[in-house]
């Protein structure tokens, strides 16, 4: 992504850039959006504007990296599902189409952020901040390390700000009337008084013992509850790299690795310099030459940097920049800084991409190399890992070859590689043995190709130097289990269903008695009691289902407001709403509610804008083979 290159240059900065309100920003499109390259294939065409397949691939990779960072190991399992991977790709493409539609609307309306807005936005980017302030040296270093020119950054930020102008106008124009917000405010603080009677399911279970005929009838009426999923039995070979002890690594190999990778264990020379910069312009050369002459006449470099440098951030410190290594700054600036021989030397005029400079050397830290003794253990561990990985790779390749050459069985591969052919009993995707319970394995195990052709699977890489090849030996399609096999399960389910039915009938009877004013006699007959609820609010500590039901009931008038409610566990409630109290005055939350409602309306208007742009636009989705694909 565009700013991930900046983050890489910043050596792991984790700050986020939030320039957009709703839409996918240029970050999704990746660096491919800014680097000109020949378009070989097209993923979509939006009103004649092409989205290249390469741009889609860049965006897809970036989205995968984001999801992997967010979901961790769970994401690697999800990637085993081709449908999930395709869903990600289509979602990314749809977001790119929406972004392109918004950009086209911005261009149509001739919205353009001013130069001052762009400068302020760049200065506020977290990547360029140090101690809460914009740091020009950091800005220059990160752009140089990332290979991004100031013009590219400027244009990208301008594009984002221009999008924001459209969105701000759209979302910012949404509003909610005070009367509407006031009504919502009062309703949110409404209180209700009620009563309820609980009819426990357990009270009806004893009377719900079903007959054998009822159990079998339930089995026939509810076949989906007795479905056996498709199952397979497989043989498999599991290849695991195992571990190689670092103690087994030859000392000479450690020494050789150290010598071959000295740069890894060395810190290059670092220099601290100060500079005076003049922005490029008509009089820039005359100004920088005048400053050089004043330096030659004996004026202090630091003082001239404070008063004359156009880099006001470093100028406030006498032009001093942070420690730098060779190759981290603009090439011309870098070359001049490392050509200075002695502390206090001043360069001639240096022209960089950012302006004209005079540079002085302040301090030098010589290159240093860590001794072998200090890094010996880490090298040994690395070599041990490499040795294990190399051995695993060779065996992995041979396993793939043997599984292909002898497709009818795993025996030849097991014999040559010294592996054990393991077998499973029947299993489904829900109860696979732990060792093979991986989406990539299950996708192959339940594929039609393996069971129809009777061949070994391709090599399946499981990560962490583990791989597997499987062979499906038996397949059992999904089917309803025989009644004899599920008789007890059917009896339990039929009993629970009958108990729920009896509880519902009792609840209806109580509701009718309550409506007729005969509830007291009914409750005494069944040994039940009424529970009083007073001053309930939407945030009261009661069962959420109970609160939802009570606040959905109409206020009582001449007739009581009654209803029944089946709880998740099977218990039945009979509810009576006695009173509703709605505050007449607004609360201190009115402004917050109004703002929230306006924001919600703005979101809806944004979605409406996208829907309108899609309906009015000509959008063609294509596969990489250039065939039209209506997603």
Image (cartoon, rainbow, N blue to C red):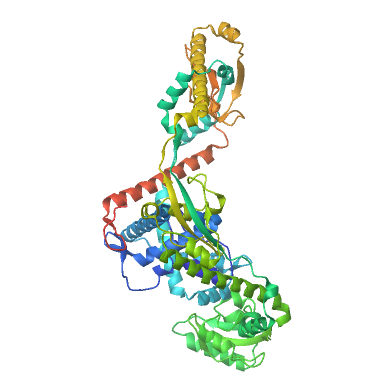
Report the front residue among 606 and 239.
239
* Residue 319 appears in the rendering: no
x 53%, y 65%: residue: 125
x 42%, y 28%: residue: 222
Query: Horizontal and vertical percent for residue 303?
Result: 64, 83
Query: Horizontal and vertical percent for residue 364?
Result: 67, 86
Query: Horizontal and vertical percent for residue 172?
Result: 43, 49
Location of residue 32 with respect to 359 vertically, above or below: above
Location of residue 214 with respect to 459 vertically, above or below: above
Q: How many marks?
A: 0
Q: Is residue 56 left or right of residue 323?
A: left
Query: Horizontal and vertical percent for residue 328?
Result: 56, 80
Report the front residue among 464 and 631.
464
Residue 368: quadrant of the picture? bottom right
x 50%, y 54%: residue: 77
Location of residue 631 with respect to 558 vertically, above or below: below
Kindly give the residue lying farthest to the right in the view shown: 373
x 41%, y 59%: residue: 408
Q: Is residue 375 left or right of residue 477?
A: right
Report the front residue among 402 and 625.
402
* Residue 194 appears in the rendering: yes
Report the front residue among 505 and 391.
391
């Amino acid at each position: 992504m565009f700013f991930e290159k900046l983050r890489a240059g910043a050596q792991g900065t984790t700050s986020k850039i939030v320039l957009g309100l709703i839409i996918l920003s240029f970050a999704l499109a990746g660096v491919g959006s800014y680097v000109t390259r020949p378009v070989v294939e097209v993923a979509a065409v939006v009103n004649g504007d092409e989205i290249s397949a390469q741009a889609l691939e860049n965006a897809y990779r970036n989205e995968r990296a984001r999801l992997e960072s967010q979901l961790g190991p769970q994401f690697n399992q999800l990637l085993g599902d081709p449908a999930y991977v395709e869903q990600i790709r289509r979602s990314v493409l749809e977001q790119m189409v929406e972004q392109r539609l918004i950009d086209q609307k911005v261009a149509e309306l001739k919205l353009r952020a001013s130069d001052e807005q762009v400068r302020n936005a760049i200065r506020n980017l977290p990547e360029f901040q140090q101690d809460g302030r914009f740091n020009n040296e950091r800005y220059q270093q990160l752009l140089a390390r990332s290979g991004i020119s100031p013009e590219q950054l400027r244009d990208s930020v301008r594009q984002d700000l221009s999008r924001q102008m459209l969105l701000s106008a759209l979302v910012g124009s949404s509003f909610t009337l005070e009367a509407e917000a006031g009504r919502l405010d009062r309703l949110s603080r409404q209180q209700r008084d009620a009563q309820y009677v609980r009819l426990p399911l357990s009270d009806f279970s004893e009377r719900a013992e079903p007959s054998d005929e009822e159990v079998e009838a339930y089995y026939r009426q509810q076949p989906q509850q007795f479905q056996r999923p498709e199952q397979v039995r497989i043989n498999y070979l599991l290849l695991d790299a195992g571990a190689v002890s670092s103690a087994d690594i030859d000392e000479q190999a450690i020494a050789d690795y150290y010598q071959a990778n000295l740069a890894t264990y060395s810190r290059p020379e670092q220099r601290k310099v100060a500079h005076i910069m003049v922005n490029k312009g008509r009089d820039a050369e005359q100004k920088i030459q005048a400053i050089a002459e004043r330096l030659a006449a004996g004026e202090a470099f630091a003082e001239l940097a404070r008063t004359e440098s156009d880099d006001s951030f470093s100028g406030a410190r006498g032009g001093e920049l942070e420690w730098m290594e060779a190759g981290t700054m603009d090439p011309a600036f870098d070359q001049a800084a490392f050509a200075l021989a002695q502390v206090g030397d001043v360069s001639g005029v240096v022209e960089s991409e950012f302006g004209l400079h005079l540079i002085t050397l302040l301090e030098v830290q010589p290159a240093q190399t860590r001794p072998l003794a200090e890094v010996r253990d880490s090298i040994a561990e690395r070599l041990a890992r490499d040795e294990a990985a190399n051995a695993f790779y060779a065996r992995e390749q041979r396993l793939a070859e043997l599984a292909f050459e002898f497709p009818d069985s795993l025996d030849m591969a097991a014999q040559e590689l010294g592996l054990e052919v393991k077998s499973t009993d029947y299993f489904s995707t829900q109860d696979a043995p732990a060792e093979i319970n991986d989406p990539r394995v299950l996708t192959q195990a339940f594929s039609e190709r393996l069971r129809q052709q009777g061949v070994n699977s391709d090599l399946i890489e499981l990560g962490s130097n583990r791989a597997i090849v499987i062979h499906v030996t038996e397949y059992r399609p999904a089917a309803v289990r025989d009644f004899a096999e599920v008789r007890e399960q059917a009896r339990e389910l039929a009993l629970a269903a009958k108990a729920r039915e009896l509880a519902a009938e009792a609840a209806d009877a109580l509701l009718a008695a309550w409506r007729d004013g005969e509830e007291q006699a009914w409750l005494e007959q069944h040994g039940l009691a009424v529970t009083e609820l007073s001053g309930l609010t939407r945030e009261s500590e009661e069962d959420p289902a109970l609160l939802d039901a009570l606040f959905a009931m109409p206020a009582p008038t001449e007739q009581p407001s009654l209803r029944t409610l089946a709880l998740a566990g099977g218990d039945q409630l009979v509810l009576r709403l006695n009173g509703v109290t709605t505050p007449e005055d607004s609360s201190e939350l009115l402004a917050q509610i109004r703002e929230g409602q306006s924001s919600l309306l703005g979101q809806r208007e944004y979605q409406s804008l996208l829907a309108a742009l899609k309906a009015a636009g000509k959008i063609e989705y294509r596969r990489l083979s250039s065939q039209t694909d209506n997603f």
